[in-house]
Every structure is written in structure tokens, then in C-alpha cells.
Amino acid sequence: MNSLAKPHQARHTVADYMSWPDAERLELIAGEIYNMSPAPTIKHQGIVGDVFNQLKQQLKGKSCIPYVAPVDVVLSDYDVVQPDVLVVCDPAKITEKNIQGAPDLVVEVLSPGTALKDMREKKLLYERSGVHEYVVIDPLEEYVQRFCLQNDGHYGSSDVFGPHEVLHLRSLPEIEIQLWEIFDMNPPEAETD
């Protein structure tokens, strides 16, 4: 079963998206409607919260601002997404209703119903839109993949991190995410053989 919410009729726009009822969580990618239900698991939401909290604490007093879903990110006339966590460093992109343009960092936590979309459609959209760093967290297998925008405008091959490592963000050089905390594990120094 794919995650299309409605049968494809015509390419939808941001104006269409903004007119839909708030009761359904939807995303618009290349004019196609994607349903974001069912609701994510408790583990998924725990990881989202932990990533957001680490970013919020480390970015306090800095110009970059972290956000947590649901926040609309308008990337084109045909693309509106709600990343799990995002960071925006350009205040001109932040409006009262949404984010206009590519965030500096996007973090998606995989769910069984949305994993393929996150790794295919959304990855291509973020690359095309100029998101500097795209981090994908797998809560079941407990690893992280990071894609960084290269000089040619494409993501290079991914960096992969295990649950006992520190993710040093390239888009936010002073910021790091302690992965054992988001996976609810003991710190590396406390591990026993």
C-alpha cells in the first residue's frame, strides 16, 4: 500500500494544500498528496523529542532555530512537507504560518509506513531544494544516515553512524547529537563487555 491519500487527478499546488482541512496530516511532493497517518509510534516520537531537545539546548542564544513537526515547510509551488525536526538559520524564511524555503538541516525518523517516501521522494526533494544536511534515523535498527549537499548540488554517499557514536553536524559545525541518548542507551563509557 502506498501512502497516497487520494487518487491522482491533477498536480496540486500549495494553494490547494492550504485550503484542505487541518484534521488530516498531509504532505505535497511534486504535486502529489501523501497521507502522514497513522500516527507515529511512541519510540518514533521519543526520538523526535530527544533530537529536538538536544538541538534546542545547543542552539540556545544562536541565530539558528530548531522546529518540530507539525510545521509546514514550503519548498516550491508543488512541495509542502512536515519534517520531524528541522533547523532554519535564515530568519527571512520564517513566517507566521510556515517556513518558506529550504531549512539548513532536516531530520526524519523512519516509520514503516513512510520509510520509502523518506528515503526516496523526500531525499530527492530535499536535495533539489538545497537542504544542506539530511539526517535519517532508523529507530528499529538503531542507526543514523547523513546526506550532505556537495558542491555540485547533489547529496554524496551517506555517512552511517551507530547508536554509541556522536553525530557532528556539518550544517551546524558546533552542534553534536549524542546518539546513545536518542536511542535510550547507556553512554559508551558506561558500557560493559
Image: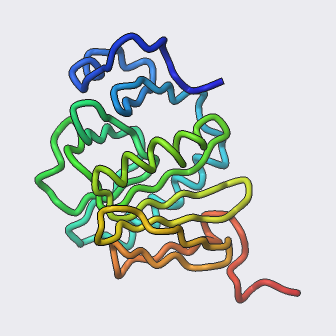
Depth order, front residue of 46/128 = 128
Name the residue located 43 percent from the left edge and 60 percent from the top edge: 134
x, y percent for residue 190: 75, 85
Left/right placement of residue 159 relative to residue 142 reads left
Name the residue located 62 percent from the left edge and 47 percent from the top edge: 44
Quadrant hosting residue 71: top left
Where 17 falls versus 66 (above or below)?
above
Where 167 falls versus 94 (above or below)?
below
Left/right placement of residue 86 relative to residue 91 reads right
Depth order, front residue of 42/17 = 17
Quadrant hosting residue 113: top right
> Which residue sits furthest right?
193
Depth order, front residue of 66/126 = 126
x, y percent for residue 3: 56, 26
For the C terminus, give its image quadrant: bottom right
x, y percent for residue 117: 53, 39
For the N terminus, give its image quadrant: top right
> Which residue sits furthest left?
92
Where 106 falls versus 125 (above or below)?
below
x, y percent for residue 135: 48, 61
Name the residue located 31 percent from the left edge and 35 percent from the top edge: 79
